[in-house]
Image: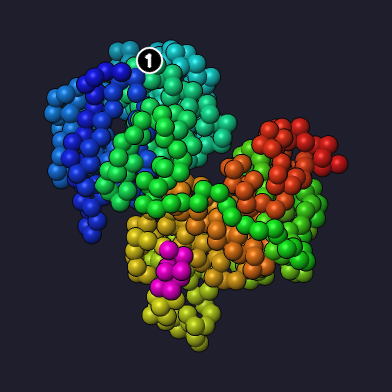
Amino acid sequence: MAETPVVELRGITKRFPGVVANDRVDFDVARGEVHALLGENGAGKSTLVNVLYGLYHPDEGEILLDGKPVRINSPHDAIERGIGMVHQHFMLVPVMTVAENVVLATEPTRGPFLDMREAEKRVREVARALDFRIDPHARVETISVGQQQRVEILKALYRRAEILILDEPTAVLTPQEADELFEIVRTLAREGHAVVFITHKLHEVLAIADRITVLRRGKKVDTVPREGATEEGLARMMVGRDVVLSVEKGPAQPGKALLQVENLVVRDERGLEAVGGVSFEVRAGEIVGIAGVDGNGQSELIDALTGLRRPESGRIVVAGKDVTRASPRSALDAGVGHIPEDRQRRGLVLDFTLAENIALHDYAKPPASRFGWLYPRRLVERAGGLLAEFDVRGGEAETLASSLSGGNQQKLVLAREISRDPRVLVAAQPTRGLDVGAIEFVHNRLVKERDEGRAILLVSFELDEILSLSDRILVLYEGAVVGEYAPDVSEQELGIAMTGGGREQAA
């Protein structure tokens, strides 16, 4: 590892109205090193790397490349200096091919014409060097999320990036795709690239990082080597207190079945059968986990249960009421609560205030309204209590939802859905993209709701979450339940079932 850091940030301060996002932060990374930037949502991680990438200009501090002060005015300026960034939300054009996305704005030409044959050749060469198995002719909209991320990495390396910033790179990946990404990152480091790896997942930094810098509320807490670091110690640095990393819950006391699914068949947007004759039930006072690799019918099942997609056949019963063909509002009125897998697209209206988002379902009912008149002050009063109860930070009742961090947006959705007192709570990826403190809160709240008699259906790609929260586990593979397991099942056994090896258990 080089003695002189290839990148050094000194005393970086960045202010936004009402908040100091970075407060005199120091950070550096050397060639051949993976340096993880760890912190809660809203700790200032993304702001810091956006300064490095030229998306923000620091109010104070300086940036050094190879020991020399530089000013980075824009992403184009950063790219010219060998800095590449893969954003959490990919910057790809879905209708264009892999090769077209990679060479976009740097297209090779032959005379006045675009030379796509040369572009595809160059993309293949870069992909081959990293052992990326990806078709340059494939349209981006047809490839998996993991492959899309590889396209983003290819874009950066094609532009000869020596410093690569990965911002929450596993937030949308399955565990298998995350493991593949780690191998890519290790290969890049061995080849001399400097990698800044931004995350809030403790096990990831211990698996991939050489050094770990922790931010909390915009300030640097410390930089530590991976050797000797523990999840408990890192969590304490992130949150400022001891964090219970395991879920504490007593045995379930299940009552009557509140959700009954019988021979349910659901088709996807292409008209193909995504859920094929699934049957199961969830009883009051228990958490039933649905485990499976993404794309095995989970989304279509959730949509059918919450009224967002009409099943082709079968039956859905909530607390004795048939809701098979219910609209989303009718499903909610029947007692279904829904924590959606995408909080920004389906959980919130980002341009609405926190109070308005909490009132989305019940704005037409007393006390929010009466005789057709809406009472905004009552919405604000109700929201204030729920924001405090669910520890939603970063704004008041009249703050826009778009201004909250991801973890606080998720707590807002949780507050709305639970406050409606549902009989059945469908929790889809409830901690996706959340930091350790927010995960602890969400897990504890789901257990509390279970103990108060709700039936909870948990759908998650995180096996640790499924194993720690569930009272029973169902494995979904190719739209069918291929096994039911107790929560003491091993990850290996679940993994076999998730790839189709558990079909005999469902017989």
Magenta: main secondary structure equals helix
In depth, the one of 331 and 435 nearer the eye is 435
From what the image shows, is residue 311 above or below residue 220?
below
- Residue 485 x %, y %: 75, 45
Picture quarter with the C terminus: top right
- Judged from the image, the secondary structure of the residue bearing numbered disc 1 is loop
Please identify the quarter of the rendering in which residue 59 is found. top left
In depth, the one of 170 and 226 nearer the eye is 226
Q: Which residues are magenta?
A: 384-391
> Looking at numbered disc 1 in the image, what kind of residue is underneath it?
Glu
From what the image shows, is residue 426 above or below residue 477?
below
Q: Is residue 39 left or right of residue 25?
A: right
How many marks overall? 1
The residue at the far right in this view is 507
Please identify the quarter of the rendering in which residue 19 is found. bottom left
Observer able to see residue 245: yes
Task: Identify the residue position indicated by label 1 in the image.
Answer: 191
Q: Is residue 438 left or right of residue 56?
A: right
From what the image shows, is residue 283 above or below residue 26?
below
Q: Residue at x 27, y 48 (%)?
A: 218
Observer able to see residue 304: no
Q: Is residue 340 magenta?
A: no
Assess disc 1: are there few (<14), some (14-19) or many (≥20) residues with their C-alpha within 10 Å of its C-alpha: few
Picture quarter with the N terminus: top left
Q: Residue at x 24, y 23 (%)?
A: 6
Q: Is residue 195 left or right of residue 291?
A: left
Q: Is residue 118 left or right of residue 476?
A: left
Q: Residue at x 52, y 36 (%)?
A: 173
Q: Residue at x 30, y 13 (%)?
A: 111
Q: Is residue 386 magenta?
A: yes
In depth, the one of 442 and 46 nearer the eye is 442
- Residue 433 x %, y %: 47, 46
